[in-house]
Image (tube, rainbow, N blue to C red):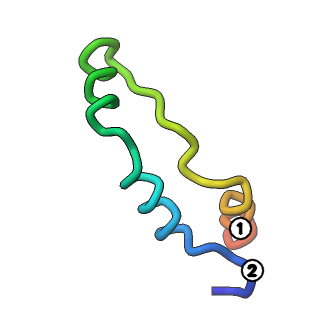
Amino acid sequence: MRKGTFNMSSEIGSSISELDWEALQQSLDEHGYAKLPRLLSPAACMSSKLEGD
């Protein structure tokens, strides 16, 4: 990993583990969809874009 880049897998995993899964399931049951909060920071998105170039 280059200096200044993020460990995207770790950031996504941490974000996903912090989700309120019961509330998401309830929203899916009631509405057929559930809105997720931001899973990646803007810096992680930029890092991902740079790695893909």
Mark closest to the chain's N terminus, 1 or 2:
2
Q: Secondary structure at mark 2?
A: loop
The answer to whether 24 is drawn above or below residue 3 in the figure is above
User: Disc 2 marks which residue?
Assistant: 4
Contact, mark 1 vs mark 2 (Cβ under 8 Å): yes
Foreground mark, 1 or 2, reads 2
- Residue that appears at 73% across and 61% down: 43
The answer to whether residue 27 is left or right of residue 42 is left
**Within the image, what quadrant is residue 51 found in?**
bottom right
Foreground residue, 17 or 2? 17
Label 1, label 2: how many angstroms apart (C-alpha)?
A: 8 Å
Identify the residue at image location x=26%, y=33%.
Answer: 22
Q: Nearer the viewer, residue 26 or 33?
A: 26
Q: Quadrant of residue 41?
A: bottom right
- Residue 28 lies left or right of residue 53; in this view the side is left
Residue designated by label 1 = 47
Q: Residue at x 52, y 64 (%)?
A: 11
Query: Residue 53's image quarter?
Result: bottom right
Which element is circle 1 on?
helix
Q: Is residue 48 above or below residue 4?
A: above
Along the horizontal axis of the image, is 10 left or right of 22? right
